[in-house]
Each structure stands twice: as structure tokens, then as C-alpha cells.
């Protein structure tokens, strides 16, 4: 996460504090040691110590691995303690969990953990930016709808060009990469649907 804005909802300090609170509570609630969570998530014990102490700004990939291990959404790890049953938010308050080297960004607009696990993202890619996503827990699906420009989504080595007005649906438990290969900016919204249940990355995957 690289949002450097402070003093409002979604600031780095507030995000890190929320992540620290939820990771520690979820881990201790399951009776897991730091070593157990490290093994399940493939996140080092040292990094987990830093996260639970709110002393680091974890990447979206690290958050995704921890969320998968617990069987929750990334949004669940960012959820404010006073979250409400009805929630209206502004895009400027959505946390920026990814920034590209050319000015692009990925915002997590909202996530649901009840009754189903769903995340809603807003992504903006500058020309020739790319984002390589780790494969998610088995059964995860992603839907991408392009609003402006076009994006190339590579899933298991196969390229899929998605243009403005088109929607791509694919299995997110495969290795996948997003690339803007044009001279123009690209914007798209993404929905990630995640099956319930904890995921242990030490266990073999079914392909």
C-alpha cells in the first residue's frame, strides 16, 4: 500500500492500524502462532510481526496472501472497527493499495464478507503499465469491465484483449497479469468473488 495521504479515512496510519488489529485478532481467534500463519500464507514471520505492530505498509500481494489464509477478503483486513450495515463511501476515501511507476493506481472501493466474499476495485493504468497478480485461493473468480481504453489480461499464459465496454470473466486462482500496451490511459472496474474457507499455501493446489 502506498497511499501517502494522512488525516482522513484511508490514511496509511489508519490502514496499518486496522490491518494490525484484524490480523492479530483473526490469528489469535484461531489459536494460530505466527509460525502457523506464516506457513499458511507464505508471508515471513518477521513481516507478520511488523504488520501486527502496525510498523509496515504491506503490499497488496502480501495482504491477499494473509486474507486467503484466513478465508476472508482483503477488505476485511481494512475494515474500520465501527463499520456499519449500510455504508456510503467516496472514491477519495478508498485506500490505494497499488501505485504503478507511471502514475496508475488500484483502489479497493469496497468489500463484503457476509453472506459472500466479494471485492470491488477501481484500477487506472498509465500507458505501458502492468500489474502482476499472484494466483488467489482455489475457486476465486475475477470480472473486469473496461471503462476507458483497453487492457491485456494474461491468464495462464494466454492473452485476452479487453476493450472499453467489454467484460472479461476468468478464474483468479490462475497466474494472471494486467498490461496497458497502448499510448492512452486505461480505467477498469474489477469484481473479485472469493469462496469461503481458509487456504493453506503449503497444501498442493488442484488445477
Image (spheres, grey):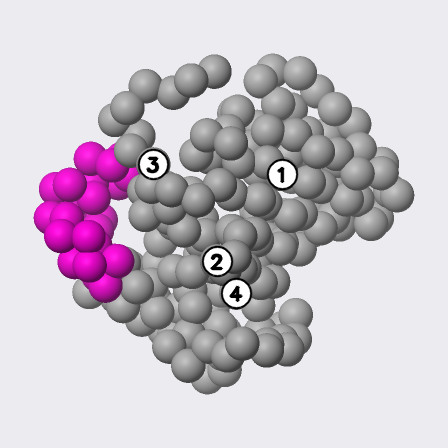
The reply to whether residue 76 is visible in this rendering is: yes
* Magenta-colored stretch includes residue 27: yes
The local crowd at label 2, few if under 14, some if 14 to 19, many if 20 or more residues have their Cα within 10 Å, is: some
Secondary element at tag 1: strand
* Magenta-colored stretch includes residue 164: no
Secondary element at tag 3: loop
Q: Name the residue tied to disc 2.
A: 113
The answer to whether the residues at label 2 and label 4 have Cβ atoms under 8 Å apart is no
The local crowd at label 1, few if under 14, some if 14 to 19, many if 20 or more residues have their Cα within 10 Å, is: some
Q: Main secondary structure of the magenta part?
A: helix
Q: Name the residue tied to disc 3.
A: 199
Q: Quadrant of the N terminus?
A: bottom left
Res 142 label: 1
- Residue 68 in percent (x, y) is at 38, 42
The answer to whether the residues at label 1 and label 3 have Cβ atoms under 8 Å apart is no
Which residue is drawn at the image coordinates 52% and 57% (left, top)?
115
Res 95 label: 4
Which residue is drawn at the image coordinates 71% and 50% (left, top)?
189
State the CA–CA distance, disc 2 to disc 4.
Answer: 17 Å
Q: Earlier in the sequence, mark 2 or mark 4?
A: 4
State the CA–CA distance, disc 4 to disc 3.
Answer: 25 Å
Residue 25 falls in image quadrant: bottom left
State the CA–CA distance, disc 2 to disc 3.
Answer: 16 Å
The local crowd at label 4, few if under 14, some if 14 to 19, many if 20 or more residues have their Cα within 10 Å, is: many
Of the two numbered discs 1 and 2 in the rendering, the one whose residue sits closer to the viewer: 2
Read off the magenta span. Answer: 24-52
Amino acid at each position: 500500500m502506498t497511499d501517502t495521504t494522512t488525516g482522513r479515512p484511508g490514511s496509511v496510519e489508519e490502514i496499518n492500524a486496522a490491518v494490525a488489529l484484524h490480523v492479530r485478532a483473526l490469528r489469535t481467534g484461531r489459536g494460530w502462532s505466527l509460525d502457523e500463519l506464516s506457513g499458511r500464507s507464505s508471508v515471513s514471520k518477521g513481516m507478520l510481526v511488523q504488520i501486527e505492530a502496525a510498523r509496515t505498509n504491506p503490499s497488496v500481494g502480501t495482504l491477499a496472501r494473509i486474507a486467503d489464509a484466513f478465508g476472508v477478503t482483503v477488505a476485511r483486513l481494512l475494515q474500520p472497527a465501527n463499520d456499519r450495515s449500510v455504508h456510503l463511501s467516496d472514491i477519495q476515501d478508498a485506500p490505494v493499495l497499488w501505485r504503478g511507476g507511471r502514475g496508475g493506481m488500484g483502489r479497493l472501493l469496497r468489500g463484503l464478507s457476509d453472506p459472500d466474499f466479494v471485492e470491488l476495485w477501481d484500477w487506472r493504468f498509465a500507458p505501458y503499465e502492468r500489474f502482476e497478480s499472484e494466483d488467489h485461493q482455489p475457486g476465486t473468480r475475477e470480472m473486469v469491465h473496461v471503462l476507458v481504453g483497453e487492457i491485456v489480461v494474461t491468464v495462464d499464459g494466454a492473452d485476452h484483449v479487453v476493450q472499453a465496454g467489454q467484460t472479461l470473466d476468468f478464474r483468479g486462482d490462475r497466474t494472471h497479469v494486467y498490461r496497458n500496451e497502448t499510448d492512452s490511459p486505461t480505467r477498469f472496474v474489477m469484481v473479485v468473488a472469493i469462496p469461503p474457507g481458509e487456504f493453506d499455501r503449503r497444501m498442493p493446489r488442484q488445477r
